[in-house]
Image: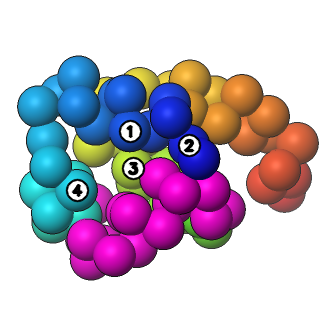
Amino acid sequence: MNQSLQDARRAKGLTQVELGIRADLNRSTVAQIECGQRPSRRTAERLAAVLDVDPVTIWPNFNELWRG
């Protein structure tokens, strides 16, 4: 489970639906990522941007996961 993503989303007062809309994703994608599915680098960056955090805050090994 990606508790960091869920915590960041809740700290912003957003539902999964609202986060999805702002990041141009559907709610089920947000839910899957919160349950541990690894997003693409682009999706991870979009989610972090919407939540106004560095991607490393949510995915501590961000740079190792998505090299290039």
Disc 3: which residue: 47
Residue 23: image location, x then y, percent: 27, 60
- Tag 2: residue type? Asn
Marks 2 and 1 in Cβ contact (< 8 Å): yes
Marks 4 and 3 in Cβ contact (< 8 Å): no
Disc 2: which residue: 2
Residue at mark 1 to residue at mark 3: CA–CA distance: 11 Å
Residue at mark 4 to residue at mark 1: CA–CA distance: 9 Å
How many numbered discs?
4
Disc 1: which residue: 6
Q: Which residues are magenta?
A: 22-38
Q: Is 52 drawn above or below residue 39 in the view shown?
A: above
Residue at mark 2 to residue at mark 3: CA–CA distance: 13 Å
Q: Is residue 33 visible?
A: yes
In the image, 28 versus 43, the foreground residue is 28
Q: Is 65 drawn above or below residue 55 in the view shown?
A: below
Crowding around mark 2 (Cα neighbors within 10 Å: few <14, some 14 to 19, many 20+) is: some
Residue 39: image location, x then y, percent: 60, 64
Earlier-in-chain disc, 2 versus 3: 2
Secondary-structure class at tag 3: helix
